[in-house]
Amino acid sequence: MNTIRELLVELTGTAEFADSSRVSDDTNLAASGIDSGDMVRLVLLVEQRAGVEVTAADMEKLQTIADYERFVAERSMAGTGGA
């Protein structure tokens, strides 16, 4: 289950992000064509769907799919996640 990948596919309308052989978990999202507006929309989707708060300081550290997946998992495990 790659929820961040699913959100990226929904956000961009392209299946490229669903395929880890095309966009690896460690690929910098900005380098893969995600602009700053898309990054903000991704954060909003993460907050809505995963029920975690993403601060501006968090956003600066979240650069890859793996970063987002780890962040959501850690926040959810800490009891701040929702459904």
Image (cartoon, rainbow, N blue to C red):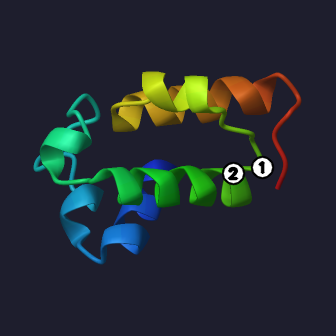
Residue 3: image tag: none
Image coordinates for residue 39, horizontal then vertical, percent = 41, 50
Return the residue nearer the eye: 20 or 39.
Answer: 39
Query: Looking at the image, is 68 positioned above or below residue 17?
Result: above
Q: Is residue 51 left or right of residue 59?
A: right
Name the residue rendered at 63%, 35% in the picture.
72
Query: Looking at the image, is 54 positioned above or below residue 42?
Result: above
Query: Looking at the image, is 75 positioned above or below residue 16?
Result: above
Residue 1 visible in the shown view: no
Q: Is residue 46 left or right of residue 7?
A: right
Label 2: which residue?
47
The kind of secondary structure element at disc 1 is loop
Return the residue nearer the eye: 19 or 40.
Answer: 40
Q: Is residue 36 left or right of residue 57?
A: left
Amino acid type for the residue under numbered disc 2? Glu
Q: Are marks 2 and 1 in contact (CB under 8 Å)?
A: yes
Residue at far bottom of view: 13
Label 1: which residue?
51
Image coordinates for residue 34, horizontal then vertical, percent = 26, 53
